[in-house]
Amino acid sequence: MRIPTAALFAKRQARTPQNEAEVPFQEILPLRLKNTVSGKADSGSDVACLQEMSVLFACLKENDFVEKMCHKEITQFKRCYKVYMDRKATAKETINKGIVTPGKELNYKQLNKYMRRFPNPE
């Protein structure tokens, strides 16, 4: 004979939730943000020219890895990589100059500079 699960739970007494008014709040850490941001999360891996690389590898595989047969794909990949490196260099220059550009994508140095303007009160 099979016993329904509702009958099993009806016998046991469930624990009632605590009353929030009776539980005192204990502040372990201060309830404010720090004035700096760590740069650990910014060290991500950037993947550049993935489409061009896959086309190049497909061409090389078709032609038994003879580079002379895939000249067009190689030049496209090199051009894409050059554009990527130029963009990365200009972004690095703006970061080193300390220019805070408006937008969502700020690195940790720009965020720290911005937060120095508006510090958290002690």
Image (tube, helix red, strand yellow):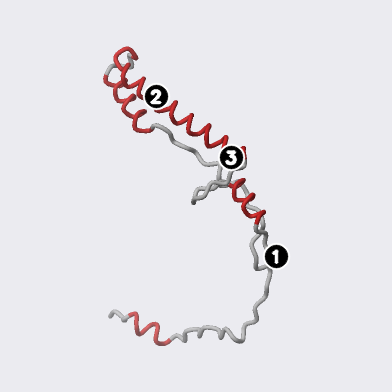
Q: CA distance from mark 3 to mark 1?
A: 27 Å
Q: Nearer the viewer, mark 2 or mark 3?
A: 3
Chain-order first, disc 2 or disc 1: 2
Specify which label sits upstream in the sequence, 3 or 1. 3
Q: Quadrant of the N terminus?
A: bottom left
> At x 47% / y 37%, what residue is drawn?
46
Residue 121, which numbered label?
1
Q: Residues within 10 Å of mark 1 (few under 14, many from 20)?
A: few
Can you identify the residue that label 2 sits on? Answer: 79
Locate residue 80, reporting x and y percent: 39, 28
Three-letter code for the amino acid on which mark 3 is drawn: Ile
> Which one is earlier in the sequence, the residue at label 2 or at label 3?
2
Q: Relative to 116, does residue 28 appear above or below in the rendering?
A: below
SS at circle 3:
helix
Q: Verify CB contact (< 8 Å) between mark 3 and mark 1.
A: no
Q: Please state which of residues 27 and 79 is positioned toward the viewer in this rendering.
A: 79
The amino acid type, in three-letter code, at marker 2 is: Arg
84 w.r.t. 24: above or below: above
Q: Is residue 24 above or below residue 74?
A: below
Q: CA distance from mark 2 to mark 3?
A: 25 Å
- Residue sitting nearer the eye, 120 or 55: 120
Image spot of residue 103 (x, y percent): 49, 50
Query: What residue would you read off at disc 3?
Result: 95
> How far separated are the C-alphas under marks 2 and 1?
50 Å
6 sits left or right of 42 in the view: left
Residue farthest along the right direction in this orientation: 122
For residue 118, which quarter of the picture? Answer: bottom right
Q: Is residue 45 left or right of residue 117?
A: left
Q: Position of residue 40 (x, y in %)?
A: 60, 46
Query: Could you tell me residue 3's position as x and y percent?
Result: 31, 81
Report helix, strand or loop for mark 2.
helix
